[in-house]
């Protein structure tokens, strides 16, 4: 065993890389959380309720439009339809925007040899998962209180869809994060783009209600498939007939490989940028 | 011991590549090493490369030793978080246990003398206080090599004396890589010298020889 100059066995050098990885991720996660909570006296409240209210307002508006509209006859609960999909979409959007700035915002942390750039993305991703889970629980609780039928048709598949969109978000986020280091325009572009995606990702409507010609175009968007999958397995009246699982898989694996490959190639350049 | 093998490092600028090291192979024996060179020759970059938080474009730098982050560096601090929370974060990065973390917090608290400020957000600190906190934090961790980049003077006169004493005590048990323009500091803290000059690296076993050579370069 190598010893340091005092003759003490160094646990620093010897620590396994997986252990280092885990402690770094944990520290970064707690740091991200602490950063948000410590913004002021009501920091703890807003950390959880800001994303909650954002989603809540969108859902309320959408539900209000549906109940006033005369032409749309719905057989299912729009509140549940919106909540189930929009939370996942929001998670995707936040992971993407978090990853975009992750390297630049944490540049000072690369002075600690332990911290690899990709860890900062994991830290932010974990925080987003944590917040999303809290939001899901809040919505389930509120839905239960007010007598909505919040029980999903197939809870395993809904959970699977959420995990899948998480992996998808990570792979896209990794590529954007790396791209953003070398071309700042990519980050700006993603910011604009993710807002437009909100409208074109079947978050507000089932794809079945759209004219077939438009359907065909929208189905090129992988997020539409994710939303349809979640809706299809959550709501009894809907199904996953439009979901192309192979297409989703391509959109997950290809960016994951490209992102990982780019990252391995460029990690040192990202650190010394 | 630090080994450099065919190390080349350059920065891309608008006027082409600016070389810091060009195909350097060298073995540095253990010891307190002072790094000298004129402004912009890449002393800090060299120090960071030796500490493996920066990387050469070609070649390899290897060492069995552990290296600290650059001493007194407060860049990683979050303004919203308290001094204590920031210290805890660094302990977390290095996977310290609950007891070790507690110990380090006490050490830093005693050393930095921040009083109530230790539990207040970093954004309320003056720059001197920030410097004291990060200096104390650096001293509370054990490494084989400490990286120091001209940040020996933090805080007021009284703290400077205290910091210097603490550092001298610290380097009884570890080595340093010191970047400095102050010849007296170099003479006091280092035994050997490393001179960066026009893409070359010159190692001197005696720091006085390195200083002589540095003065020679400066004259021409």
Image (cartoon, rainbow, N blue to C red):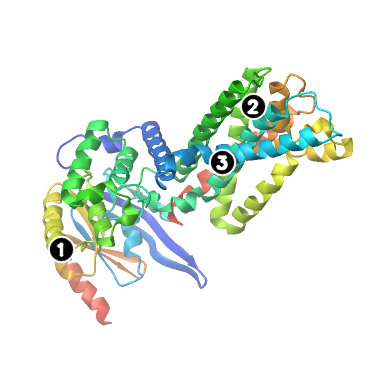
Q: Is A172 placed left or right of B173 in the picture?
A: right
Q: Which residue is mark 3?
A: A95
Q: Marks 3 and 1: CB-CB under 8 Å? A: no
Residue at the image point whose x is 72% and y is 37% from the top: A62
* Residue bearing mark 1: B206
- Asked whether the viewer can see residue B219, the reply is yes
Q: Is residue A22 above or below residue B138?
A: above
For label 2, the residue is A161
Q: Secondary structure at mark 2?
A: helix
Question: Do marks 3 and 2 share a chain?
Answer: yes
Choose the circle earlier in sequence order: 3 or 2: 3
Left or right placement of residue B82 versus residue B136 in this view: right
Q: CA distance from mark 3 to mark 2?
A: 16 Å
Q: Nearer the viewer, mark 3 or mark 1?
A: 3
Chain containing the residue with disc 1? B
Residue for point 58% across, 24% down: A140
**On screen, residue B215 above or below B150:** below
Residue at (67%, 47%) from the top-left corner?
A195
List the single residue furthest toward the bottom.
Answer: B220
Instruction: State the image quarter where residue A65 is shown.
Output: top right
Q: Secondary structure at mark 3?
A: helix
Where residue B19 sits in the image (x, y, percent)?
42, 66
Label 1 and label 2: CA atoms lie apart by 65 Å
Of B52 and B108, nearer the camera is: B108
Q: On what subunit does the disc labeled 3 rest?
A: A
- Please tell me if label 3 and label 1 are on a single chain: no
């Amino acid at each position: 065993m190598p010893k340091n100059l005092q003759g003490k066995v160094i646990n620093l050098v010897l620590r396994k890389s997986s252990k280092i990885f885990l402690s770094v991720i944990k520290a970064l996660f707690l740091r991200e959380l602490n950063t948000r909570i410590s913004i002021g006296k009501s920091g703890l409240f807003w950390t959880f309720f800001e994303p909650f209210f954002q989603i809540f307002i969108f859902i309320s508006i959408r539900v209000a439009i549906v109940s006033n509209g005369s032409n749309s006859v719905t057989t299912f609960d729009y509140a549940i339809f919106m909540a189930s999909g929009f939370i996942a979409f929001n998670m995707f959007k936040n992971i993407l925007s978090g990853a975009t700035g992750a390297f630049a915002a944490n540049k000072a942390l690369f002075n600690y040899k332990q911290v690899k750039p990709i860890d900062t993305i994991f830290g932010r991703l974990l925080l987003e998962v944590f917040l999303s889970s809290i939001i899901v629980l809040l919505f389930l609780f509120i839905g239960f209180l007010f007598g909505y039928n919040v029980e999903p048709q197939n809870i395993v598949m809904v959970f699977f869809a959420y995990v899948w969109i998480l992996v998808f978000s990570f792979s896209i986020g990794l590529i954007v994060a790396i791209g953003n280091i070398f071309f700042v325009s990519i980050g700006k572009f993603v910011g604009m783009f993710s807002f437009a995606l909100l409208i074109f990702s079947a978050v507000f409507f089932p794809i079945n209600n759209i004219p077939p010609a438009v359907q065909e175009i929208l189905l090129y968007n992988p997020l539409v498939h994710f939303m349809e999958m979640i809706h299809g397995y959550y709501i009894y009246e809907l199904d996953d007939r439009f979901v192309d699982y192979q297409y989703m898989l391509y959109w997950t694996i290809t960016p994951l490989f490209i992102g990982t490959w780019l990252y391995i190639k460029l990690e040192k350049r990202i650190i010394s940028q | 011991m630090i080994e450099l093998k065919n190390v080349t490092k350059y920065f891309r600028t608008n006027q082409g590549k600016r070389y810091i090291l060009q195909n350097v192979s060298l073995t540095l024996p253990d010891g307190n090493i002072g790094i000298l060179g004129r402004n912009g020759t890449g002393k800090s970059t060299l120090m960071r490369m030796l500490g493996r938080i920066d990387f050469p474009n070609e070649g390899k730098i290897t060492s069995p030793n552990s290296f600290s982050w650059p001493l007194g560096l407060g860049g990683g601090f979050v303004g919203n978080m308290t001094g204590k929370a920031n210290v805890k974060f660094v302990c977390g990065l290095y996977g310290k246990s609950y007891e070790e973390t507690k110990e380090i917090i006490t050490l830093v608290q005693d050393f930095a003398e921040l009083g109530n400020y230790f539990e207040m957000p970093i954004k309320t600190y003056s720059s001197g206080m920030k410097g004291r906190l990060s200096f104390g934090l650096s001293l509370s961790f054990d490494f084989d090599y400490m990286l120091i980049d001209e940040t020996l003077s933090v805080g007021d006169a009284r703290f400077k004396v205290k910091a210097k004493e603490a550092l001298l005590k610290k380097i009884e048990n570890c080595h340093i890589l010191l970047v400095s323009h102050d010849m007296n500091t170099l003479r006091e803290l280092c035994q050997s010298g490393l001179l960066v000059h026009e893409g070359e690296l010159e190692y001197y076993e005696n720091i006085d020889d390195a200083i002589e050579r540095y003065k020679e370069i400066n004259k021409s």
